[in-house]
Structure formats: C-alpha cells, structure tokens
Image (spheres, rainbow, N blue to C red):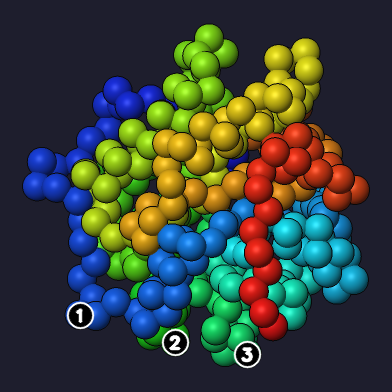
Amino acid sequence: MRLIFATLTLCLATTVAAAGPVCATRDEPAPALTRLQDAMADGRFVAYQPTELKIWDGNPVQASEASIRADLEALRPWFDGLITYGAHSGAERIPAIAKELGYRAVVMGVWDIENEIEIENALAARRAHPGIVVGVSLGNEIVFGNRGDWAALKDAVEEIRARAPTLPLTVTEPFAAFLEPDAAPLLAELDFLAANIHPVFEPWFAEAPPANWADFVLRVTARLADEAFCGPILVKETGVPTGPAEENFDEGKQAAFYAEMAKAMPPSRERAFAFFSAFDAPWRIYDFNPVPGHHPEEAHWGLFTEDRQPKRAMKELTPISAPAR
C-alpha cells in the first residue's frame, strides 16, 4: 500500500465541472453490488495485508495459510469485511479462509494491474467464492504514486469487466485525485468508489480535536458524492497511527478518532468507512520503494500490533456477532 504524504485540503485547486458527479454508464449495476452495499450498511470493514507478507528489496515474502488464518481469527470478533491490497504471495488465499471463519465480504485488491497472474488470482478467487468476493479494487494510489495514469486504469477496468461482467470494480486513490477532471472517464466505469482520506496529513491536524478529524472525513466524502461520483463510496483508508511517540501519536488518539468516526459517519449502503489498518507493519519503514522522505509512522497504522495484540481502539470497540456458519 502506498500512503499519502502530502497536504490535501478541501480548498484544493483541482475541481470538476459544475455539472455534478459522474454516474456509471453501465445499464444495470453488478448484482454482487447489493451484497457489497449490505456489508457496508450492516457490517464492518478493515483494510488488511497479511502480517507475513512483507517486501524486502522488492521481493515479497510468501504468507502462509496458517499465518493468514491466525490473522483473520484475531480480527474476526470485530470485523466481518476485508479490503486487501494484492492477490499474490499468499493473499489470494484470503477469501477461502475468510469464508471458513464467517466473514461476509472481501474486496480483493490487485496491486499490479499489468500482472496477469495476479489478475487471474483475483478472478479465480471470485469464481471459487462468489458469495464472499463482493468486488475488486485495481491498484492502490497508482496515479498518485506515478505508477500509471487514468487511461491505464480505465483500460484495466474495461479488460476485467469483459472477463467478469458481474464483478463490482473500483480503483483506489487519495480523494483529491478523484476530483481532477481527468478522472471523470474512469469514474463512469466504476461500480463503487474506494477513496483514501487521511486527516493526519492535513496542516491543522495536530491542533484540532478528534471530532474535527472525523468531520473532515465526513465532509470530504460528501464532496466526492456531490462532485465526483454518484454511486456507493467506501473510504478504504482513514486512520491515525499510534506512533512514533516523538511525533505525538499514541493509542489514545487512534481510539478517539474511531470513536468520533462512529458518530460522524454511521455506515449506510451509500457511504461507509473501513478501519485502517489491521496490523502494524514495521518492515514498511525499510520498504524498497518508499514515499520520499522519512516516515516512521508507516510502522504504526495497525489496530493490532504485528504479533496480533489488540490496541486500545479495539479494546474500546464493541465486537460484532459472528454469523452462523
């Protein structure tokens, strides 16, 4: 995953035409979109990458089935929906394990939209588990990270649409990118929108109370609905890291943010947010392709430690009931 280390405010110069939000051009919504929206309204999503899946010098470490199962067992008391980042190095096994553990929805990520093996892994997971794979998110901040452009994303959506016509599709970018006029042709092809909205990178964050952090996410989501996209919006990434302490991050701030988010944005079929992210990832500080600059907070986004111990936000969050298997 690639995080945003730039100031993105509501006073952005990038705007869209006054005509209003882009609506999908498909004649009918994908049938599985109903299941996704049900999970948005009645469930609880978390952004998840397996704890064993690390990147060292550009090489992914394979995540074992046993480790993924242990991850998902730790998360299951609080979450029944998952959003993943890739379909490689073991992550393609997530839907099968999640189904066994009583999860209701998985949005599969495809990290490399030009990797046919990864794309086929995601589509194979959908074919094997159509009841739980409710969508695919192509890439993560590809435009923002200069790994591709809107045309490349549109081509990828169209290609997968031809191969899996009923599969709900989206892409993930920071919210400001979706407000660019050049994004409109792609937005018309999407079934739902997966946006990243991080108040911690705003210049006012340190001085504002948690209620303002949550209100920012709410107002940005409303702006996306008003100006960019008229379908369901699932905020894929929003959160507060728990460290480093010298940058005034701690577990209390993370817990306070999610408590305010629960009040500011109660889930619905049209708008919901995912918790970000499942587990700490200390290896990300040494990622071979980091965002320019030194960003030690990369290690501390988890709601759980790397060894799967719940942090304060989880201890204060009411568990959800596991459905009957």
The kind of residue on which mark 1 rests is Asp
Give the numbered dot on residue 163.
2
**How many residues crowd around disc 1 within 10 Å: few (fewer than 14), some, or many (20 or more)?**
few
**How many residues crowd around disc 2 within 10 Å: few (fewer than 14), some, or many (20 or more)?**
few
Q: In which quadrant of the rendered view does residue 189 lie?
A: bottom left
40 to the left or right of 311: left
**Residue bearing the label numbered 3:** 128
Who comes first in sequence, dot 2 or dot 1? 1
Label 1 with label 3: CB-CB less than 8 Å: no
Quadrant (top left/top right/bottom left/bottom right) for the C terminus: bottom right
Give the numbered dot on residue 27.
1
Q: CA distance from mark 1 to mark 3?
A: 26 Å
Out of 101 and 305, give the one closest to the viewer. 101
Q: Residue furthest left?
A: 19
* Rendered location of residue 181, percent (x, y): 23, 45
Who comes first in sequence, dot 3 or dot 2? 3
Per the image, label 1 sits on a secondary structure element best described as loop
Out of 180 and 288, give the one closest to the viewer. 180
Residue 156: tell me if it is visible: no
The kind of residue on which mark 3 rests is Ala
Q: In which quadrant of the rendered view does residue 60 lie?
A: bottom right
Per the image, label 3 sits on a secondary structure element best described as helix
User: Residue at 34% of width from left, 46% of height from top?
Assistant: 178
The kind of residue on which mark 2 rests is Arg
Marks 2, 1: nearer the viewer: 1
Label 3 with label 2: CB-CB less than 8 Å: no
User: Residue at 90% of width from left, 48% of height from top?
Assistant: 307
Label 2 with label 1: CB-CB less than 8 Å: no
